[in-house]
């Protein structure tokens, strides 16, 4: 059947093909085509239909049929015929006098031609052929079952899988994969394990066509699901790829670097698998000579991207010795400087953006080591790194982050939707979360951009980035946080917490009205917690960091607190939140922040003997209840160490509130609060000094 049109041999996806078409046929050929189509429409049996189809494919190869002709063929025979031919051939039954081998070739050619019409791809009959096509690609034989699911002993047929037939099968699968829900259709029909086995068995065309198809499938939205369902087959495939990578020449390895990341699992999926850890170690062993050698710019990007992907999986554990780790970080930092320190207005190509984003990930992975204090070293990410090497890494990082600051200073609001701008912003925020003493002047000058960027996204002013993030997300796990309008602000919060504790940057933040933005964020987060009533809550580190930043402002800027309306709104929010948080054990740290922050604001109110409203009374009742609950030794939780300093501040602030608002003493006396707490804790309490200060404040009000 070699003379039958074989669309898979000349096309890889829907809509591709030769420029030749029925429109380029001579009048006599066009007339013959019409006669064949007429015969096809009036065929009385499969023999007549097959004869007409053979004539059509000989007259005009299937890949060159235009959409109108394809539609007419579909209307005449539908997808039922090729699907039926394929199933018949797989069962080893001849039809219309044709042997099974020729039937399967004709069926695959028809399906390949029809698959070029995107409207036919979701058709159930075409999708039903996918398992049969996969079986042909994997091994050319099929175990079938009768419709009643009874298995026959002779229901196995082996076919000669020549390249034209295989190309037609791949054409159909590629076309389905490119359709809207194609990856899900292929996954549910066993495409991933079948294609993996085809590659491992070194079947014909598997390297040329099966691997690229798998790459497209695994870079779609079914990536995580594929790894959860077929981790064994995918690990075997990755081991096979790793072996090829190790045996290849350096030049061939450079070409392979751009493809390997497609076949790595999402971080966290296989991290506990010792076989996978071994595979990653082998990949690093083959990758190290490329990082250490001289690489052309056109290949360096792929090497750094693969390095970043491997770092995402196991950190520095399998990378290599400290000297190599320093070299990798240095190469990433140099690339960032070269890419970003261009004259204003220079456009960064998409390929360079991809490379720089990978460099950002390498830089972030190095931060834990580089930002540790020399005086108090902690567990490092790169084991065995000397002090000199650590300082070298820190120096390289400083230069790279200086380049990021230089780049971000040039960004205008019209570019806030650019994903690369967000990647640069996020990387810089990760640095600032660890280190704010370096480049301090430059960071302060950049604060208007950082606050403006976070505020713009938080207020929903830029929709494009959110849409892009949603489109690019390939994770199906329920616990993953999807992109939200507060994402940029969440990344910035740790830096704001550090900067708000220092005079100069705090003054700049006040000029930018940062407290109001933080109160809005806290209010939004509280609305989310309240909406989750009845569900199991999780700890909210971003809200805790937001409270900590507001606490810095409250302690250091009392006049601003007294005059800024946002702190009035904050006080109302805290009075509403604390009574609810009392009963959420997993949110105890957030409750401690709310309690401390509310008391710090209350102590700044002028002295007054006037009676208070019910809302204030409920707030202070909740405060006393919370402090008694966590100070009770029988109820101290694992979060006690995290909240101890907050409780000390709360007790100090409560003393100030008692002095300014005498009615609180009455409330405490009615609850016998102080005696009850002191009896529980004894004299050696970690907060005994604060309790003594509170006792003296109460004595003054007698």
Image: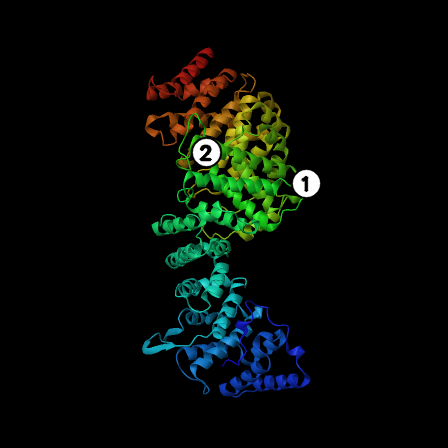
Q: Nearer the viewer, residue 426 or 694?
A: 426
x then y, percent, for residue 702:
45, 11
Q: Residue at x 44, y 80 (%)?
A: 101
Secondary structure under the numbered disc 1 in the rendered image: loop
Residue lying farthest left? 153
x then y, percent, for residue 639:
39, 31
* Residue 579 appearing in the image: no
Q: Earlier in the sequence, mark 1 or mark 2?
A: 1
Q: Is 71 positioned to the left or the right of 145 in the image?
A: right
> In the image, is residue 374 above or below residue 2?
above
Q: Residue at x 49, y 85 (%)?
A: 46
x then y, percent, for residue 375:
43, 25
Secondary structure under the numbered disc 2 in the rendered image: helix
Q: Nearer the viewer, residue 536 or 411?
A: 411
Please state which of the two labelled residues, at mark 1 or mark 2, is closer to the viewer. 2
Q: Residue at x 56, y 69 (%)?
A: 11
Callout 1: 10 Å neighbours few (<14), some, many (20+)?
few
- Disc sitting over residue 99 in the figure: none
> In the image, is residue 55 above or below residue 241?
below
Q: Which residue is mark 1?
A: 344
């Amino acid at each position: 059947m070699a003379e039958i049109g074989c669309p898979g041999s000349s096309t890889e996806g829907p809509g591709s093909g030769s420029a030749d078409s029925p429109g380029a046929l001579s009048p006599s050929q066009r007339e013959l085509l019409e006669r064949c189509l007429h015969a096809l429409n009036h065929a009385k049996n499969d023999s007549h239909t097959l004869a007409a189809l053979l004539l059509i494919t000989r007259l005009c190869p299937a890949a060159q049929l235009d959409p109108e002709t394809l539609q007419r063929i579909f209307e005449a025979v539908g997808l039922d015929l090729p699907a039926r031919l394929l199933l018949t051939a797989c069962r080893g039954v001849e039809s219309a006098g044709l042997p099974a081998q020729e039937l399967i070739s004709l069926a695959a050619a028809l399906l390949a031609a029809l698959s070029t019409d995107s409207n036919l791809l979701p058709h159930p009959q075409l999708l039903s052929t996918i398992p049969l096509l996969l079986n042909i690609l994997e091994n050319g034989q099929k175990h079938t079952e009768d419709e009643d699911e009874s298995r026959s002993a002779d229901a196995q047929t082996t076919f000669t899988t020549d390249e034209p037939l295989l190309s037609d099968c791949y054409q159909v699968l590629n076309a389905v994969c490119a359709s809207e829900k194609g990856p899900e259709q292929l996954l549910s029909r066993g495409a991933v394990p079948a294609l993996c086995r085809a590659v491992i068995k070194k079947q014909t065309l598997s390297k040329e066509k099966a691997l690229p198809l798998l790459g497209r499938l695994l870079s779609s939205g079914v990536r995580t699901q594929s790894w959860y369902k077929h981790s064994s087959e995918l690990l075997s495939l990755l081991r096979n790829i790793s072996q090829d990578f190790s045996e290849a020449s350096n030049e061939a390895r450079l070409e392979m670097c751009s493809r390997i990341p497609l076949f790595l699992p999402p971080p966290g999926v296989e991290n506990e698998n010792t076989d996978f850890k071994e595979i990653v170690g082998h990949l690093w062993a083959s990758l190290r000579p490329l990082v250490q050698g001289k690489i052309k710019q056109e290949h360096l990007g792929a090497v750094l991207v693969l390095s970043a992907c491997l770092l995402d999986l196991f950190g520095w554990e399998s990378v290599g010795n400290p000297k190599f780790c320093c070299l990798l970080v240095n190469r990433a930092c140099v690339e960032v400087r070269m890419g970003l320190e261009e004259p204003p207005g220079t456009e960064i190509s998409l390929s360079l953006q991809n490379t720089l984003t990978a460099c950002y990930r390498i830089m972030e992975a190095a931060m834990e080591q580089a930002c540790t204090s020399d005086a108090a070293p902690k567990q490092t990410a790169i084991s065995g790194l000397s002090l000199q090497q650590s300082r070298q890494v820190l120096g390289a990082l400083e230069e790279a982050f200086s380049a990021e600051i230089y780049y971000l200073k040039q960004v205008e609001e019209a570019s806030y939707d650019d994903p690369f701008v967000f990647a640069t912003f996020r990387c810089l925020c990760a640095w600032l979360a660890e280190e704010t003493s370096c480049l301090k002047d430059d960071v302060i000058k950049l604060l208007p951009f950082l606050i403006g960027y976070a505020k713009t996204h938080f207020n929903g002013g830029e929709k494009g980035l959110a849409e892009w993030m949603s489109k690019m997300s390939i994770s199906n796990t329920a616990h993953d946080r999807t992109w939200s309008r507060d994402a940029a602000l969440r990344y910035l919060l740790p830096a704001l917490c550090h900067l708000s504790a220092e005079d100069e940057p705090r003054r700049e933040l006040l000029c930018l009205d940062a407290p109001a933005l933080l109160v809005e964020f806290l209010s939004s987060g509280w609305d989310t917690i309240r909406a989750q009533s009845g569900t199991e809550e999780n700890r909210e580190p971003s809200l805790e960091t937001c409270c900590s930043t507001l606490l810095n402002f409250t302690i250091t800027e009392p006049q601003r607190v007294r005059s800024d309306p946002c702190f009035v709104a904050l006080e109302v929010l805290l009075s509403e939140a604390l009574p609810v948080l009392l009963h959420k054990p997993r949110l105890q740290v957030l409750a401690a922040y709310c309690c401390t922050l509310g008391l710090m604001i209350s102590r700044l109110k002028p002295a007054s003997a006037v009676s208070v409203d019910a809302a204030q009374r409920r707030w202070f009742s909740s405060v006393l209840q919370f402090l008694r609950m966590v100070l009770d030794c029988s109820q101290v939780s694992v979060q006690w160490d995290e909240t101890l300093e907050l409780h000390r501040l709360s007790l100090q602030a409560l003393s100030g509130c008692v002095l300014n608002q005498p009615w609180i003493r009455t409330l405490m006396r009615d609850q016998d609060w102080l005696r009850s707490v002191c009896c529980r804790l004894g004299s050696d309490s970690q907060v005994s000094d604060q309790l003594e200060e509170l006792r003296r404040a109460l004595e003054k009000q007698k």
